[in-house]
């Protein structure tokens, strides 16, 4: 079962919600966060990335940053203001990006179920990033950004969600990236309906927010060390049905060609694969688009060998196994400084600009991994390749926080 727990949200007053709402802390660097929050004292980035209010080049993991985060959080509570709901509630959170619409249930979910694998992970986490968000939660005594979950669609959840979203919303605004954010507060009997409907869902899957989830579990270990139960036993999340999810490709750029020239690399690729001219976006699974010397080429990988694991059959794995490592010498993509990654929301023109600028020698445009692929890998106990999924649109921090 999936245990969904209503909670007393800390949220902005309705009028200030558009100014408080901020991009997730981990999709921007300090310079980008500073630019986004500049001139907006209510931006939640002052809490989630408090180093932007300290001298340039401040260590983001220094004691001063966490002290500033606490200070900024208290100021924001008073000035936004942030209000705490009188009763535990659930919420419906709708994201609209162009023609794409997805509606999720926001609440808190059991960390016991996270520890037992009912809430399933698909990627490894880094200890330094866990350390950062764990300390952030403990210092603020709050989870300030939701984990992004998905689940196999449920008609019972859909019915209850439709009832709530027919009511007037709590928040409704369009952010500066043109994504519309609409949130409703569920009240009365429908809360029990949602809890019951989620109780019939066998598994939840983390789409985005692995470090937030892992940090919530670590914060629970410390806060619950005395054996007591509390708000720290659950993690803030928004769960979206799989049939509404949008996964964009996570593309790659490499700084140099290793021992190859453009001509010799093309010759080697033609020995190994069918290589055709263009387009910039792969037409189907099993194809990769490559931008080299001002032109797009399609590399046809062919059918994946059946003796490979589900994760190793994915195009991002096969690119790594057949081209990036053996030909270009790119090792562990989590640490190799010669490779970088570009979310699909930026489009293939971003890849062209990076290569044409001379900063990178070659770019690879991927066909997106599906939610079904992610679920199958998780259900088999596997781990997705690093940087394989880019979920869009993103939730905003600061709209719903969970006090622990």
Image (cartoon, rainbow, N blue to C red):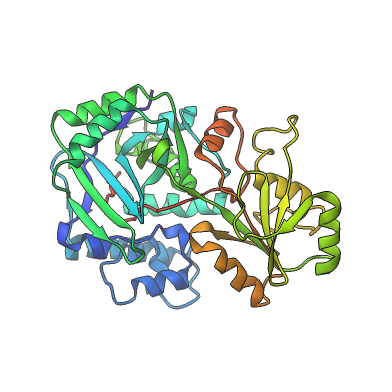
* Total residue callouts: 0
Please tell me whether residue 318 is drawn above or below residue 72 in the rendered image.
Answer: above
Q: Is residue 313 above or below residue 367?
A: above
Give the residue drawn at x 13%, y 47%.
168
Where, quadrant-wise, is the N terminus in this rendering? top left
Q: Who's the residue at 68% across and 45% down the image? A: 317
> Quick check: 232 above or below 249?
above
Q: In terms of depth relative to the viewer, which is nearer, 68 or 264?
A: 264
Q: Is residue 238 visible?
A: yes
Whole-percent x and y of residue 178? 33, 63
Q: Which of 59 and 25 is in front in this view?
A: 25
The residue positioned farthest toward the front in the image shown? 277
Determine if residue 222 is in view. no
Q: Position of residue 382 (x, y in %)?
A: 61, 33
Q: Quadrant of residue 148?
A: top left
Specify the quadrant that holds the C terminus. Answer: top left
Residue 194, percent from left and from top: 25, 29
The x and y percentages for residue 96 are 32, 52
Looking at the image, residue 336 sits to the left or right of residue 395; the answer is: right
- Could you say which is closer to the camera, residue 384 or residue 121? 384
Residue under the point 75% across and 34% down: 305
Quadrant of the image occupied by residue 69: bottom left
- Residue at 46% x, 28% y is 118
């Amino acid at each position: 079962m999936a245990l969904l727990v209503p909670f007393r949200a800390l949220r902005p007053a309705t009028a200030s919600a558009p100014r408080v709402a901020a991009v997730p802390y981990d999709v921007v660097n300090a310079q980008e966060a500073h630019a986004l929050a500049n001139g907006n004292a209510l931006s939640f980035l002052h809490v989630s990335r408090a180093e932007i209010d300290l001298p340039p080049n401040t260590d983001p993991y220094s004691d001063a940053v966490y002290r500033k985060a606490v200070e900024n959080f208290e100021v924001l509570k008073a000035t936004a203001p942030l209000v705490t709901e009188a009763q535990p509630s659930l919420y419906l959170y709708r994201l609209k990006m162009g023609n794409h619409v997805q509606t999720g249930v926001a609440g808190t979910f059991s960390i016991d179920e996270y520890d037992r694998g009912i809430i399933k992970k698909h990627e490894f986490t880094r200890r330094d990033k866990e350390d950062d968000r764990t300390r952030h939660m403990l210092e603020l005594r709050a989870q300030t950004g939701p984990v992004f979950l998905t689940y196999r669609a449920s008609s019972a959840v859909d019915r209850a969600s439709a009832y709530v979203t027919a009511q007037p919303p709590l928040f409704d605004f369009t952010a500066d990236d043109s994504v519309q954010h609409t949130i409703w507060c569920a009240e009365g009997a429908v809360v029990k309906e949602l809890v019951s409907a989620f109780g019939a869902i066998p598994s939840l899957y983390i789409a985005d927010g692995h470090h937030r989830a892992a940090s919530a579990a670590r914060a629970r270990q410390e806060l619950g060390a005395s054996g007591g139960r509390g708000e720290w036993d659950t993690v803030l999340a928004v769960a979206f049905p799989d049939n509404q999810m949008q996964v964009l490709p996570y593309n790659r750029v490499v700084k140099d060609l290793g021992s190859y020239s453009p001509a010799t690399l093309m010759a080697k690729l033609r020995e190994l694969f069918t290589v055709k001219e263009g387009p910039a976006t792969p037409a189907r699974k099993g194809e990769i688009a490559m931008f080299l010397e001002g032109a797009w080429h399609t590399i046809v990988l062919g059918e994946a060998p059946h003796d490979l694991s589900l994760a190793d059959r994915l195009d991002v794995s096969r690119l790594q196994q057949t081209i990036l490592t053996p030909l270009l010498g790119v090792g562990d993509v989590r640490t190799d400084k010669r490779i970088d990654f570009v979310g699909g929301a930026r489009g293939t023109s971003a890849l062209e600009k990076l290569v044409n600028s001379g900063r990178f020698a070659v770019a690879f445009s991927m066909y997106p991994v599906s939610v079904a692929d992610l679920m199958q890998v998780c259900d088999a106990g596997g781990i997705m390749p690093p940087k394989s999924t880019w979920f869009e649109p993103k939730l905003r921090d600061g709209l719903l926080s969970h006090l622990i």
